[in-house]
Image: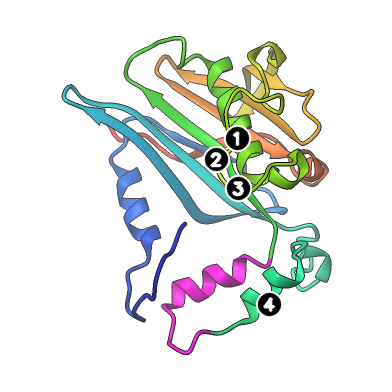
Amino acid sequence: MRIVGVLPEDAPDPRVEMKERLRGLSFPVMGLAPQMAVEDIDAVAIADARGMTGQSQFAVSISYLLWRNPADRSDPVNLAELDEEERAALELAPPWPRPAWLSEYVGMMRYPQLWEAVRTSWNRDSSEHTTLPRQLVAHANHILRNKFRWQLGFESGPVHDDGDWEIKESAVNPSATLEIDGVPVPACEIDIDPFVYAIGAQTRADVVVTVVIAREHLPLLRVSLSTRNPAET
């Protein structure tokens, strides 16, 4: 969610529009299986492509809050590791009233998130770019590019592709297994990067689901999926 400028107190919650867009999909959207350490906060990101021949791509990414001690959410161990500037920005109250949903969103920023952890991607046309290994690598590099800038030594500004930091398709293990709706299915995984673990599966001929989790969070959760939004027929 990206918010720019001053919003009126009655500004609509963008999550409502996202829910509406998910209702008409012809493919199921996957999410992390329900578990104590993970909270689905309806943080949805959508990317799509369409041209003169209609829609050709549609991807849905789901973010989550992570609770290190889910039994006691008031435990300070649950708070994100923020620097002084970030903490001050969250404490600063604007001189105008915020929409209730925005205040809720700001409050959630105090806690660690599994940002765009699960991505379900539909592609109308098959190509070398839509294979499971290629999409798994793309998702993993997307997370690295946006969430591990400091660890990778990036300067401010855009990050160029084809750098030494990028995960390559040769890193993909095609012999993994992923549990989806309680059933183990064949999967591909990336388990050699020092910062993230990635796994994904083909759920339909035209649909791939990928998961990318920071390694530091892996001991706290179970990497298995369930249907979040069923397909509409």
Q: Indicate which disc residue 31 carries.
A: 2
Front-lying residue, 140 or 95: 95
Q: Quadrant of residue 16?
A: bottom left
Are the residues flagged by discs 3 and 2 in contact, CB closer than 8 Å? no
Question: Could you tell me which residue is drawn at 45 percent across and 46 percent down?
Answer: 45
User: 110 or 156: nearer the eye?
Assistant: 156
Q: How far apart are marks 2 and 4 (CA)?
A: 33 Å
Which residue matches tag 3? 115
Nearer-the-camera pick, 194 or 164 = 164
Task: Give the amino acid type for the residue marked by disc 1 in the picture.
Answer: Leu
Q: Which of marks 2 and 4 is nearer the N terminus?
A: 2
**Image location of residue 92, percent across then percent down:** 60, 82
Q: How far apart are marks 1 and 4 (CA)?
A: 36 Å
Residue on which the image places disc 4: 88
The residue located at (68%, 48%) in the rendering is 35
Residue depicted at 57% across the width and 27% down the height = 161
In primary-sequence order, the first of circles 3 and 2 is 2
Label 3–label 4 contact, CB within 8 A = no
Residue 107 within the segment the image draws in magenta: yes
Callout 4 crowding tier (Cα within 10 Å): few <14, some 14–19, many ≥20: few
- Start and end of the magenta stretch? 94-110
Q: Is residue 182 visible?
A: no
Instruction: Please name the colour scheme applied to the rendered image.
Output: rainbow
